[in-house]
Image (cartoon, grey):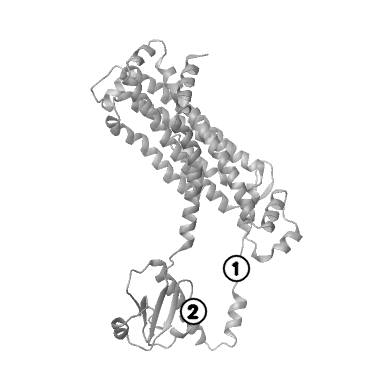
Amino acid sequence: MSKIGLVIQREYYERVRKRSFLITTLLTPLLMVALILAVGWMSTSGSSEAKIIEVVDASGLVAGKLESAGTITYRPSTRSLDEIRADHGDTWGALVVGADVLTRPDNVQLYTWSSSTLETEMAISRAISDILETEKLKTYDIENLDQILAAVRTSVQIKAFKEDEESGEVKESSSVLSMVLAYAFGFIMYMFVLLYGVQVMQGVIEEKNSKVLEVVVSSVRPFELMMGKILGIACVAVTQFVIWIAVLAVGGALAVNAFVPADLMAAAQGMSAGGMTPEMTAALGSAADPDAIAALGNLMDVDYLVKMLVVFVVYFVGGYLLYAAMFAAVGSAVDNIQDSQQFQLPVTLPIIFGLIGMISAMNDPNGAMAFWLSIIPFTSPMVMVARIPYGVPGWELALSIVILVATFVVIVWLAGKIYRVGIFMYGKKPSFKELAKWITYR
């Protein structure tokens, strides 16, 4: 076995045999699912506090038409605001509507006896706006106005199709699924690159403080040691990632089977198999959400999933290797974590910039900024994986991957140069100028 292989084996087994690795590998997917469910529950549960609002309406247009909804209950009142404030009883607040509200829609005040929320204020505002709009339309003296408005209201649902320029194949696409995958891929990349890159830096610093290392470097070249350490921890990251994906995939499949209606599943299966039949379309009717059907259909498309996963893994590994090499160079230059702070900033800034670029790429995946950020190796791991669900030409993928790999090799070589000198430097925090000198030493 080569020297690099021996270092990889040592780094890998040293970490996967730890109890902490097993615990985090098994618990993290469960915590991620619990977090997603908790966020979903909190976003839909809203406030459970009953809000009885006494309405003082000087215009006579609003109070009788306000319909209670959710936790808000409207109670028309003949009392004045001062009387309500003196004895508000079980009410949560008082809504005062001015006599000229039809011409001055800002003449509305809400007084509460406890803290109000933006959600509550917007709900009240929307309810009053609908009433005033209806009242204004009535001034045009149009017969059967309610029936006309009901007939005019139209909800347009767009089905999006994407044509493959190479094969000419046309498939229904889902912008919702593309955005969800882009967010998920980008943030997973950001989390793993930062987490395992710092692990490489800490490992290098720990070994620098071990006198055994001085014996090791006498038989292993710094480049081989750096490459072995980075690839060894990369294998740990990939092992953990594969286990997480397997657990989440099984959990996701069970959730889809349990919560997605059977007719929607049938429509998605029909779309992934080549399109929905007229019978399916008629059975689902207008209530079917095209985005939901397209998203499920794409998720059932094995070719689509394999393509997404393969490209993601390539950039996941490539991005980790690049930043791990940069963190290894930082660890090679210092003796402790505290001294590494000044060197970590130039490494972490491109990661943060890539995360911002990822969000921009989702809004314009084919724009010039998205293109260049997906080619530049320091941002391409985050930006390119955000563009993948929207479709990226093969030559752009190939160019981006080649540049990413080449940059990684160069950074490892530079890290080895710094490591070669840094392991024998103790008690001194080097500057960027000194690091440049270390690289040029022969």
Dividing the picture into quarters, in which one does residue 195 lie?
Answer: top left
Q: Is residue 42 above or below residue 354?
A: below
Q: Residues within 10 Å of mark 1 (few under 14, many from 20)?
A: few
Can the viewer see residue 337? yes
Report the residue marked by disc 2: 67
Can the viewer see residue 173? no
Q: Is residue 338 above or below residue 52?
A: above
Q: Is residue 293 above or below residue 14?
A: below
Screen quadrant of the C terminus:
top left
The span from disc 2 to disc 1 (Cα, nearest Å) is 24 Å
Disc 1 residue type (three-letter)? Ser
| Element under disc 1 | loop
Precedes in sequence: disc 2 or disc 1: 2
Residue that appears at 64% across and 48% down: 298
| Element under disc 2 | loop
Residue 155 numbered mark, or none: 1
Q: Position of residue 366 (x, y in %)?
A: 53, 46
In the picture as drawn, the residue positioned furthest to the left comes out as 427
Q: Position of residue 419 (x, y in %)?
A: 35, 20
Confirm or deny contact between disc 2 and disc 1 (CB under 8 A). no
Residue 308 numbered mark, or none: none
Q: Which of 28/220 is in front?
A: 28
3 to the left or right of 57:
right
Disc 2 residue type (three-letter)? Glu
Q: Position of residue 348 (x, y in %)?
A: 37, 37
Q: Position of residue 220 (x, y in %)?
A: 42, 13
Dividing the picture into quarters, in which one does residue 422 lie?
Answer: top left
Q: Which of 7/26 is in front?
A: 26
Q: Which of 346/43 is in front?
A: 43
